[in-house]
Amino acid sequence: MVTRPIDVTEALIADPAMTRAAVEWDADRAVTAIYSEHYRSLVRLAAFLVRDNATAEEVVQDSFVAMHGAWRRLRDTDKALSYLRQSVVNRSRSVLRHRMVVDKNTPKPPPDMPSAEHGAIIQLERSAVVSALRALPDRQREALVLRYYGDLSEAQIASMMGISRGAVKSHTARAMAALRAGLERDS
């Protein structure tokens, strides 16, 4: 007579008085056998899906723990490996969904803030420019401010100042030259 291994379901039917401890022992033995034979291939499967070996190992371990806990409810123990593969795929999908939600809801880092030293240098440069602007004649300063600070065209400046466009060009060019000379002298 050929003796074949008795699976857990057959054992329950054959001996209804079988204790829960015996079922758990059979579940331990069955899960251990599947684990030793298929663990690496399941980790590779999960690693391909989640692109991270550590997370893949966690997914597979969680799947084995879930299968061990549900071993008594498993209808066909011959399909335990199929159940396990499906569990690994589902848990991998769950990990990917979780990552997507986390990435979507992660607060954006604030833009790079300039250093305090940078702010001090800008302040010094600004005060030097303001001082140099104050040293210019009124008409040159007015033409320069309207052109570069007010961002007005030559025609608009001429209209506001009551002078010709040529005079605006002349005042702006002289003001720029004087401003440049004053800033170079102060440096």
Image (cartoon, rainbow, N blue to C red):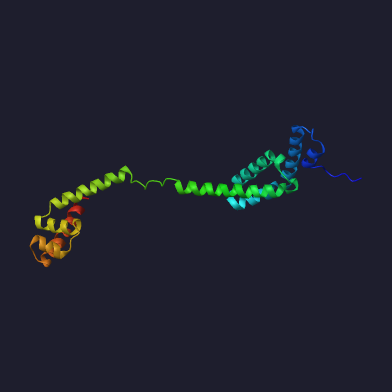
On the rendered structure, is 49 left or right of 6?
Answer: left
In x, y percent, where is residue 171?
12, 61
Horizontal arrangement in the rendering, residue 141 relative to residue 60 (left or right):
left
Picture quadrant of residue 4 = top right
Looking at the image, the residue that sits furthest to the right is 1
| Residue 37 picture location, percent across and down | 74, 47
Tally of marks: 0
Residue located 75% across and 48% down the image: 78
What's the residue at 11%, 63% (across, down)? Answer: 158
* Quadrant of the snapshot with the N terminus: top right
Q: Nearer the viewer, residue 15 or 146?
A: 15
Residue at 74% across / 39% down in the picture?
A: 27
Write down the quadrant of residue 179 in the picture: bottom left
121 up-or-down from 162: above or below? above
Q: Is 187 placed left or right of 54 in the picture?
A: left
Q: Position of residue 183 (x, y in %)?
A: 20, 53
The one of 85 and 18 positioned closer to us in this rendering: 18
Residue 143 versus residue 66: which sits nearer the camera?
A: 66
Asked whether 17 or 107 is in front, the reply is 17
From the viewer's perspective, is 163 left or right of 74?
A: left
